[in-house]
Amino acid sequence: MQLKTRYGSFGGCYAPESLIPILQEIEQGFIEAQQDEHFQAEFHRLLQDYAGRPTPVTHAKNLSSEYGFELYLKREDLLHGGAHKTNNTIGQLLLARHLGKKRIIAETGAGQHGVATAMTGAMLGFDVEIYMGSVDVVRQKSNVERMKLFGAKVHSVSSGSSTLKDAINEAMRDWIANAENTYYCFGTAAGPHPFPALVRYFQAIIGQEAKKQMLLQTQHLPDAVIACVGGGSNAIGIFSAFLDEQSVKIYGAEAAGKGVETDKHAATLNKGQAGVFHGMHSLFLQDKDGQITEPYSISAGLDYPGIGPEHAFLQQTKRVQYHGITDNKAIDAFEQLSKKEGIIPALESAHAVALALRLSQDVLSAKRVLVNLSGRGDKDLHSYFAYKKGLANESI
Ligand SMILES: *Cc1c(COP(=O)(O)O)cnc(C)c1O
């Protein structure tokens, strides 16, 4: 069996030489796992009995009648841990066990991947250490507390912008030094091969379920599928089931931060340029010398300066359209879903909801729109109220 290492010209494996045998070991283990009945049975048993799959698809009735199209939400917010991240950590930690590793490291931005790794690590009996930017440690305090409660050690990283990309650099350093007994559980569909392929594989359950559920509930495929894009894992998870369905339009919502003209710090797919970083050839926000620039978004989970290689390819081939969503539009969607449907979305997911509402007003002729609600917003209340308070101060 041969795994795909490239998506068009994007992807590849640009890792330090010392990591190549380790990445090959992971690739080999992943190929075995896909054909191993016991691995598959345990993966699906844990997704069901531990994480709570399948997650439902909810028809958002009130917003639907207000906006004049049928809005459906794939409820990854209801997954144990609060976001889609759990699908990936269960898959990768089972893979780590298959490879005989005892220690798990991971990077985290919003804290959700750190929580999911620590939580799954506790359940499967691993030692877990998490790298997190010091800015994010402050922004996402309750997630740090949860990681500690699960028994993980949290390293606060204060280099560069002290956010996700710096946490990844630090985790890579740890891995290079300790690869013998350590598995690096990467949090999104990016990085060197085989990570984009294996994260896609473990997240594909979202799309597989959602497709069946839409057919069962509406007798139709959705006309459009929308997901938010940070590194791209929840998006590729739901998109994967619809890429070959030509009738289904597919959209990605990326963070456009404050959205002012001079804002070069967000919207990777729209403003990024091709380059090599974090082990892959993809699109990145960078300055004229090729240095990676510091991203900004109200949602910590979307402020990664790069994008998974398959999304770069899907944009290039125009199969998926990617739109930037500003902070204020995401906040508006966050409020609307809370007030009208009784669902508090993660700020990341609110970008996808905002794009659905925006498209309904112009181009979208779609009747049925499926949005991947990647996570729940309890973790974001602090950011939300701080944002509202900031607005109040500005208007004085
Ligand atoms: C981490 C996260 C994201 C962004 O990551 P992707 O890999 O792009 O999916 C989106 N939504 C939520 C709720 C997250 O926790």
Image (cartoon, rainbow, N blue to C red):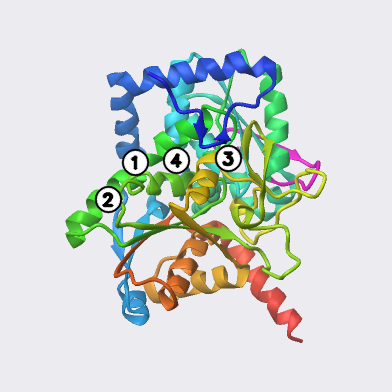
Which mark sits nearer the N-terminus, 1 or 3?
3
Residue 103: x and y in percent read 58, 21
Q: Secondary structure at mark 4?
A: helix
What separation in Å lies between label 1 and label 4 (alpha carbons)? 11 Å
Q: Which mark is residue 86?
A: 4
Left or right: 167 in relation to 49: right
Q: Tell me the residue at 30%/73% (across/down).
A: 61
Label 2 crowd bin: few (<14), some (14–19), many (20+), radius 10 Å: many
Q: Which residues are magenta?
A: 147-163
**Can residue 335 be spotted in the picture?**
yes
In this figure, which residue is indicated by the disc labeled 1? 205
Residue drawn at x 47%, y 62% as measured from the top left:
352
Examine the structure image and report whether residue 237 is included in the region drawn in magenta. no
Q: Does residue 318 appear left or right of residue 389 in this picture?
A: left
Check if residue 160 falls in the magenta segment: yes
Give, as a three-letter code, the residue at label 3.
Gly
Quadrant (top left/top right/bottom left/bottom right) for the N terminus: top left
Q: Above or below — where is 26 with respect to 245?
A: above
Tell which circle, 3 or 2, labels the residue nearer the N-terminal end: 3
Contact, mark 3 vs mark 2 (Cβ under 8 Å):
no
Pointer 2: what residue? 211
Q: Amino acid at mark 1?
A: Ile
| Residue type at tag 2 | Lys
